[in-house]
Amino acid sequence: MAAQDYNQLLRSPQFQELVRQRTRFAWTLSIVMLVIYFGFILLVAFAKPLLATKIGGGVTSLGIILGLGVIVSAFVLTGIYVQRANSRFDELTRHLTREIL
Amino acid sequence: MQGFDIANPPFDRLTHQESEELRAGLDVGYFAPGEVIIPRGRSSDWLHVVIKGSVKVRDDSTVPTVLGPNDSFDSRALVHGAAGEDFVAVEETLCHLIPRRIVVDLIRRNAAFAAFFYADVSRKLDAFAGQRKAEGMDSVLRTRVRDVRYRPAVYVDGGISIEQAGRCMRDNDVNALFVRDGGRIGVVTGMNLSKAAVLLRRPLEAPVRDACHFDVVSVGLDDFVFEALLMMTKHDKRRLAIRSNGDYVGFLEDIDILGLFAGNSQLIPGRIERARSIDDLAGAAQAIGAQVERLHRQGVKVDVIAEMTSDLNRRLFRRVFEMSAPTTVREAGCLLLMGSEGRGEQTVRTDQDNAILLDRDVPVSDLGRFRDAFSSALDGFGFPPCPGNVMVRNPVWSQSLDGFIRQLKAWVLRGDPEAMMNIAIFVDAVAVTGSADVLIRAKAALFELMRGETALLARFASLIGTFETPNLGVLSTIMASVGAGPDGIDLKKAGTFPIVHGVRTLAIDRGILETPTAARIEALVRAGTLEPAFGRELTGALHVFMEFRLRSQLLALHTEELGSEAVLRLDGITTVERDILRDALRVVRQFRELIGSRYKLGAF
Amino acid sequence: MPRLLILAIATLVALDASSSNVLAAGPDLGAVQKQPLNWTAIIMFLVFVLGTLGITYRAAAQTKSAADFYAAGGGITGFQNGLAIAGDYMSAASFLGISGLVFASGFDGLIYSIGFLVGWPIVLFLIAERLRNLGKFTFSDVASFRLDQTQIRILSAVGTLVVVAFYLIAQMVGAGKLIELLFGLDYLYAVIIVGVLMIVYVAFGGMKATTWVQIIKACLLLAGATLMSLIVLWRFGFSPEAMFAEAVKVHPKGDAIMAPGALVADPVSAISLGLALMFGTAGLPHILMRFFTVSDAQAARKSVFYATGFIAYFYILTFIIGFGAITFLMNDPSFFKLGAGGAYDKVKDILGGTNMAAIHLASATGGSLFLGFISAVAFATILAVVAGLTLSGASAVSHDLYAEVIARGRASEQKEVNISKISAIVIGIVAIFLGYIFENQNVAFMVGLAFAVAASCNFPVLLMSVLWKGTTTRGALIGGLLGLVSAVVMVVLSKAVWVQTFGFARELFPYDNPAIFSMPIAFLGIWAFSKMDASNRAKIEVAAFDAQYIRSETGIGAAAAHVH
């Protein structure tokens, strides 16, 4: 592929649409993950007593529930991304590829 | 004469007595640069053996072969009376000249020499290797006359003219006729007719009975070939009548017997070239298959069999193409044979991978007509169709160069198993007709597309790890003896495929155009990728697997147990063979390790 | 094979019955402080280790046509590949290490589990897709798309070797402790045995970290951990609350185990650890490959999804196992090294150290048979991971350093294979040495350091070369080296190494994990030195970004820029 082909592709609305959608989606999810995780870490760092709070009158602490929540959220976020990428983004890429070849 | 090297094959097969005779008749010839030693289509009175200098074999379709010292040429000009190519001195060249008379005499007396000579691949062919020497000869000599492809009997009346007899010979494509004259039956040969007309100056209207002889020497239809050979020698005849139930049913010529030894390698091309219709070619196609078995029985090495077979197949496909393609397609198209056929490694015919690349547009109707005609011709030969539909019939495999390069791009982009298979099949392609340049351009495009595709190459390479390569070491032998180990080895999975595919991957990676695995290995050695010693081992191992495979394929053809034909049963081989196999498997494992490390396949 | 297995198990059960008597009547080894050999467990161990490692044999399917050959290679589903990724990632170090951390300090272990897990979504969102599109699966291949491959390969080889070294320490300590405990050997000999075994595997063929090996390993590990957790939960009527309550009662730290504690004493260490764990995954040399073992991008994404599920599930299990170990083991003196008068520290005195908590729990919940099984699975896992790591390290030396840099692409493949084998041997010897000197470190902690190095060198270079147009070779090289060196220096000067291993009085670097400092150093270094790079080469590299960008977003275009 020659340089002008690259330029043409870079400017093509389909390419820009794909990149824009995917980048935004991926970064959104990444930031959500980062916020959840570092939120948890910051609580560990600065709010130990809060995490030690007991839940439901037993010995189980809020920290354990939140920790499990982080684990579950990682799994769920991955699922959301895969679902979206395997349908929407792949379709966009396919369109683009068909255009080029 | 001194200086003639009798250790040089095929002369090493001669007895002391025979080589003395040969030496006694030797002459030496000098040829100036550019001099045509034997023009195509001419006969030659000598067998030339190069002493010094070099000789180019010119054939308009292929790159010329160059013969050097100790190479001999040209058996075809000598025996068939027509050279297949031009033989031209490249530089000042000295040759030993062996008179035709002596060669023919030696061929008649020494079957080993004959077989060698007729296979015409003497430089490469180490035919009667080891223990199979006797077996190979023996099986030919113990063939019955009825199993030889002899010439059918054509009867004429003694009263017809010499001219009519000559026409009859030509129309029936025979060299001799039976002549009924009253109660007796005589024989007239083409040579008899010529002598009568030219030397004895008989008029062409003279009755043929005057030219024929009635002391017919014959052999029974159920006699052995060696009996026929004995009789030919005893009566100094090149041709025997064949009798069955008191009738003559045909002629057996020395050339037919030699054809047995030589596997008809000289005869099939003639049949292919002479063919006037697809039906004529069907017979030749059958003959190619039959020849494989015969050559193998004679102990010809498998790489030579494969080379000869693929050469014949290419001629066959070229003819089919010429017959079935409309002019437009013929001019624009480059017919490709791919897969094992393209690598020249197919012996027993399996599936056919073929394609056509067009370097300019042709009318759609012409292309459609060609696809149908070509495919139905192959169907008519009984060639198994390709299960993956990699055939001219499939539009993917018959399109313009530009379209095909786009297709290659799509495959590289997709990289799924099907795409990888198609890439693998294509990279093994050879052009059998038309402009080979089209193919080279397509391959160059593929190599460029694959450049830097480390992940795709790795995944491509990882296929060699799909199947285990078993170890035939002491432990597995013990295990097998108590029934706990493998009792058979899948030659294709354990041996051939890993070698062929690994070498193919390296070839793509390095942009090597050659297709035969052995040639690719040589190129890789030259490029420094493989070390020479290992390259030799690898080629050797490949031939071991091909040899065993051919053996079990032939067995399977007879027992009709197709499907398991790639499995070699370990209890069916000798200890020596087992050692050879073990060694070959070791080389494959070493090679897999090398590929594994090269493409970081640890994780696959 | 199944018949053989049943026979072996039957024998073991018989042995178990008799040996427990022997145990009861066994001599008091007193000062030596070694348990008599548990033959049942040992035999079970050997049977299973050989079984798992020997399982690479696959029944050969009938293949008739070429298509079958090609399909066989790409026929792995996203689910299977997910299992393989999980198998690769769930090293025994994290199994033994995290359950050991939970055993020692409860909640703190969870911080590690979470950190190891959350790297995956980030890898998927930001890295995996682009790598697949680029068609490259090693860090050096990606970075050399437009940067100078010779310099990049030097950096990548050094980075890879350091990461491998830290990761290997963790695996060696885990395996060494396991062998020490099981066979009653001295730790030094145990580590040597593990190292030699690993060298034999890697250098003389055999073990490969193939997809199927990883799948089988993952299944065994998940099955074993599930079973152990079920037994633990069953004892508490499947009420985690009851389990926690009991643990709080038994553990010397009492209620403190339910909240963050001493493990992440200060905020800086906590955040630093978090950064390392989250971003280290993407920089590990052997992980990225798995996006390419399936043929299409969809399956590759799905496999990360399944892998995240399996890994999450597994870490939840290790948490339960850790608490199970507290409740099952702490009041049973037979698992501890007894001091004068039978007194023992419920954490420090556990036989083999806290890394062995899960192993002891297997014995407590399922007897010698289960002990043998879990030990074997853990050991086989370690060997597989170690083999994979050693291969990565060896290939860094043989391919990146030797073939590409020293021989400039003119080495024959055989030569490369030989160099790779020699490197594997050297790496093995180094691993034995390091494994020996780091004997008393928690293995999860050591893995955390490996992640910190990966996050400070490989990850920044990878991310910047793919995402930032301005990255140049000089920037990547200097920035990457700065990250690498600072990470390593800070680790060496930290308490774990400087004080606990080298025996100095005071640590020179106050925090446990360097990532919070070394990662910014790397990123800043790459940025600053790229900006300052005014060479012609740099201009070409920046210009080549567009081609790389398109390719990384869509998979379209050439796989290498025309820079070189």
Image (cartoon, coloured by chain):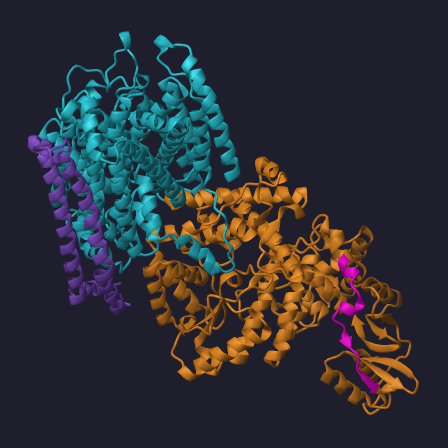
The residue lying at 88 percent from left, 65 percent from top is B234
The residue lying at 35 percent from left, 57 percent from top is B450
Residue C170 on the magenta span: no
User: Chain C, which colour?
Assistant: cyan
* Quadrant location of the N terminus of chain B in the rendered image: bottom right
Which contiguous range is marked in magenta? B139-156
The residue lying at 9 percent from left, 36 percent from top is A42
Left or right side of B235 for C550:
left
**Does residue C548 appear in this view?**
no
Residue B145 on the magenta span: yes
Camera-side residue: C24 or B532?
C24
Camera-side residue: B98 or C90?
C90
User: Chain A, which colour?
Assistant: purple
User: Chain B, which colour?
Assistant: orange
How many marks can you see?
Answer: 0
Q: Position of residue C190 (x, y in %)?
A: 38, 22
